[in-house]
Image: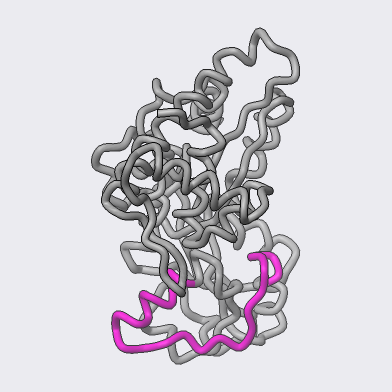
């Protein structure tokens, strides 16, 4: 078989995007060139790799097998690049990191900035996802490193402890709930909420918790950061759910009241997960160790 790494990267991008056009754009290739590469791969193998339909493409059984092997080959190539980077100036490494909202906003900025400062030739792509989605992405090879809630089933992955935090409710000092110190999330659902953007993994998580008990969050406004949530909560627009670390920090400068959530899921043991640490490039191993030790 005469496949090169560009062929394999292109095929993975087409499958992940569900479209040859979108996959070609990710690779900065013309659509015609991308189509020709994939067609040549199919000719070389003597079988179809993609089912082409009006709404997009999806892999055939042979294509799914190629996806599996392509990921392994590209990961090995990336590891080789990393191992050789110590000997070749200008050779850059690339790490795909996925994290849930809590870790991404509260705990990652500091250690990531330290790591990047000490590894100037390494780039990191960060994507925010729900913890269960992150576990699946790491297991499938779509992410190199994941930061997830400790309650997730991570069977088959290597796991390292990262941080412990908890979610709390914050209110304005003159809100009707301001006299309460502890409560269940379900008991707060009659109130108006200030939340994060609907694409946030935390916001989706909270909405799912409400849906499971037949309720819904009454969101007055959705913002991009926990600090912005705190500012509008202080103005009594609604109540918010934020990490304890964020609430503690903002209570020093804002007139806020904190209510501890009694739900088991409110306590967050955050973990680092990878498929197998020893199979990752040296610089990715360095990142995992740095996060675990920081």
Q: In the rendered view, tell whether residue 123 sits above or below residue 179.
A: above
Q: Nearer the viewer, residue 82 or 181?
A: 82
Q: Which residues are magenta?
A: 204-228
Q: Report the colour scheme.
A: one colour
The x, y position of residue 90, in whole percent, is: 75, 20
Quarter occupied by residue 249: bottom right
Q: Report the residue at 52% width, 18% height from top.
A: 80
Q: Is residue 224 magenta?
A: yes
Q: Is residue 176 magenta?
A: no
The x, y position of residue 180, in whole percent, is: 47, 79
Quarter occupied by residue 226: bottom right
The answer, for residue 200, to whether it is visible in the render is yes
Residue positioned most to the top? 87
- Marker count (numbered): 0
The answer, for residue 101, to whether it is visible in the render is no
Q: Nearer the viewer, residue 30 or 14?
A: 30
Q: Report the residue at 39% width, 52% height from top.
A: 149
The x, y position of residue 232, in whole percent, is: 70, 79
Query: Image check: 127 left or right of 154?
Result: right
The x, y position of residue 204, in whole percent, is: 46, 71
The C terminus sits in image quarter: top right
Q: In the rendered view, tell whether residue 146 sits above or below residue 238.
A: above
Q: In the rendered view, tell whether residue 46 sits above or below residue 203.
A: above
The N terminus sits in image quarter: top left
Q: Nearer the viewer, residue 73 or 228?
A: 73
Q: Report the residue at 66% width, 8% height from top.
A: 87
């Amino acid at each position: 078989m005469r496949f090169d790494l560009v062929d394999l990267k292109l095929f993975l991008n087409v499958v992940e995007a569900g479209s040859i056009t979108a996959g070609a754009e990710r690779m900065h290739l013309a659509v015609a060139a991308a189509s020709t590469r994939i067609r040549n791969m199919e000719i070389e193998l003597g079988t179809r790799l993609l089912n082409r339909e009006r709404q997009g493409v999806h892999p055939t059984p042979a294509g799914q097998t190629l996806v599996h092997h392509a990921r392994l080959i590209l990961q090995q190539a990336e590891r080789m690049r990393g191992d050789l980077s110590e000997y070749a100036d200008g050779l850059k490494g690339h790490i795909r990191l996925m994290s849930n909202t809590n870790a991404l906003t509260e705990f990652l900025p500091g250690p990531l900035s330290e790591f990047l400062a000490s590894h100037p030739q390494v780039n990191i792509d960060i994507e925010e996802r729900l913890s269960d989605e992150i576990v699946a992405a790491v297991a499938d090879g779509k992410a190199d490193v994941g930061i997830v809630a400790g309650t997730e089933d991570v069977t088959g992955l290597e796991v390292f402890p990262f941080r412990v935090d908890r979610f709390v409710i914050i209110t304005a000092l003159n809100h009707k709930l301001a006299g309460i110190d502890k409560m269940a999330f379900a008991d707060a659902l009659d109130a108006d909420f200030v939340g994060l953007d609907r694409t946030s993994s935390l916001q989706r998580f909270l909405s799912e918790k409400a849906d499971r008990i037949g309720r819904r969050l009454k969101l007055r406004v959705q913002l991009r950061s926990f600090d912005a949530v705190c500012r509008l909560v202080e103005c009594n627009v609604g109540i918010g759910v934020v990490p304890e670390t964020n609430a503690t920090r903002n209570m020093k400068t804002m007139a806020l009241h904190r209510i501890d959530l009694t739900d088991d899921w409110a306590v967050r043991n955050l973990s680092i997960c990878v498929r197998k640490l020893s199979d990752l490039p040296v610089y990715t191993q360095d990142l995992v160790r740095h996060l675990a030790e920081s």
